[in-house]
Structure formats: structure tokens, C-alpha cells
């Protein structure tokens, strides 16, 4: 006897919903390009609308004002970054492979999102400091979560005697995260003259092998 229960599949977005999602994405992409070129304070909603080829009223259907748009841009993009980092750390069972995958994924995020990375850090320490303070709290929470997961990799490696207990796992996670970020920012400052750190092995060797036998 068959059960009367049916599996419910998620409803497919309607054409109108897909169109709204596309419009919103176009607006955010255009805003990112303008913000990264001119800075947050130098861009107007009218300018974003003009470049995105929408009536300015269309922007206000999605965002209350420029600050609301900017916050959505930062929070949604950093959420994507965070999810990619977490997925990279959970993809393998071997701890060294997890660290290797972390470097690769983080490097790919920097390489493919240069305007967003530059925008975020320039505005964090620039004229938009007060605006960024609220955003930074939420972005920092995500970063702290990724550090805790990274610390778990070191903890697992220590428990299996794969890694030496030279420091507590969170300290190692902060050091590893900071090392990769430093190399990526060095490339970001002068991408034309400095090599992109795409090979994770040299960072792993610095970190795992050390200078002294």
C-alpha cells in the first residue's frame, strides 16, 4: 500500500522572480565597478542607474538608498567568500590537503575578485570608516568562524600526531591565515611586477617545515 505522502520539491522561481534577481545582480555588479573605480562617496544612485541602464526608481525597488546597496554588496559577497573557504576546509580528510585547499581557494578568491577586495579594504580605512564599522562586525564574525574551523584542522592534526604542538590551534590558524593574506596583499599592491602566489606548496613549506632542522 502506497503512502499518501508526497515529496515536496522546492518551487522553481517564476520568470518574474528570475528577472528581478537578474536586475538586482546587474545593479550590484555595476555598483561594485563604480565604487571600486571612484570610491563610495563619489558615486550616486543616479550614476549607478545610468551605467546599469535602469531607471533610478528601479534601484529604489531593491535598495532604500546608496548605503543599503553598499551594505548588501559587501555582506553578500563576503558571505560567498566565507562559504567557499569553509567548503575548502571540509573537502578533504587529510589535514595537509585541507590546508593546501585553503590556500588555493583563498588565492582564487583574491585573483577573481580584485575590485571587491580593493574596495572593501580601501573603504575600511578611508572616509567610510563609520559606515564600515557596522559591516566590519558582521564580516569579522564570519572571519572568526573560518578561523575556528581552520583551528580545528590543526587540532585534528595534533590529535593524530601529524602536527607538533608548537602552539595552540587557534594561534596556528591566525598565523597561517595571516601568512597567506600577507602574500596575497603583496601581489595585490603590484600585480604587474609581483608573481601571483598560486602555488600553495611554498607557503606550506614555510609553515610546516620551518627554518631550523
Image (cartoon, grey):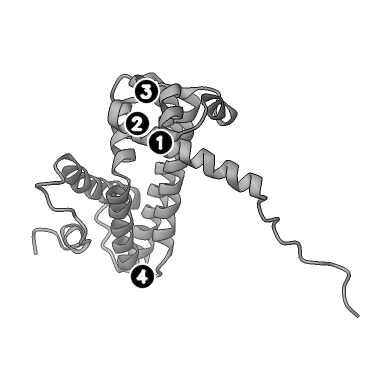
SS under mark 4: loop
Q: Earlier in the sequence, mark 4 or mark 2?
A: 2
Q: Are circles 4 and 3 on residues that touch, CB within 8 Å?
A: no
Q: Earlier in the sequence, mark 1 or mark 4?
A: 1
Residue 75 visible in this rendered orientation of the protein? no
SS under mark 3: loop
Task: Classify residue 38 by image quadrant.
Answer: top left
Can you tell which mark lies on residue 43?
3
Disc 3 crowd, CA 10 A, few/some/many (<14, 14-19, 20+): some
Q: For mark 2, what is the residue?
A: 34
Q: Nearer the viewer, residue 27 or 173?
A: 27
Nearest to the eye among marks 4 and 3: give it: 3
Q: Return the x and y of residue 51 as percentages of the image width and height.
A: 40, 32
Residue 14 placement, left or right of 95: right
At horizontal 32% and vertical 67% (from top left) the residue drawn is 97
Marks 3 and 1, how far apart at CA = 11 Å
Q: For mark 1, what is the residue?
A: 30
At horizontal 88% and vertical 77% (from top left) the residue drawn is 2
Amino acid at each position: 500500500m502506497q503512502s499518501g505522502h508526497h515529496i515536496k520539491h522546492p518551487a522553481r522561481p517564476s520568470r518574474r522572480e528570475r528577472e528581478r534577481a537578474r536586475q538586482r545582480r546587474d545593479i550590484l555588479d555595476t555598483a561594485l565597478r563604480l565604487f571600486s573605480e571612484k570610491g563610495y562617496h563619489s558615486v550616486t544612485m543616479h550614476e549607478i542607474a545610468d551605467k546599469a541602464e535602469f531607471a533610478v526608481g528601479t534601484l529604489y525597488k531593491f535598495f532604500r538608498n546608496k548605503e543599503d546597496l553598499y551594505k548588501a554588496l559587501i555582506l553578500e559577497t563576503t558571505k560567498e567568500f566565507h562559504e567557499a573557504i569553509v567548503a575548502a576546509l571540509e573537502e578533504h580528510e587529510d589535514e595537509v590537503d585541507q590546508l593546501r585547499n585553503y590556500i588555493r581557494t583563498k588565492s582564487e578568491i583574491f585573483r577573481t575578485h580584485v575590485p571587491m577586495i580593493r574596495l572593501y579594504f580601501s573603504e575600511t580605512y578611508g572616509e567610510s570608516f563609520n559606515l564600515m564599522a557596522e559591516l566590519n562586525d558582521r564580516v569579522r564574525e564570519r572571519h572568526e568562524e573560518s578561523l575556528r574551523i581552520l583551528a580545528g584542522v590543526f587540532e585534528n592534526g595534533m590529535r593524530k600526531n601529524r602536527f607538533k604542538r608548537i602552539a595552540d590551534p587557534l594561534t596556528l590558524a591566525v598565523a597561517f591565515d595571516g601568512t597567506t593574506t600577507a602574500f596575497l596583499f603583496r601581489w595585490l599592491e603590484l600585480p604587474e611586477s609581483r608573481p601571483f602566489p598560486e602555488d600553495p606548496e611554498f607557503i606550506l613549506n614555510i609553515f610546516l617545515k620551518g627554518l631550523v632542522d
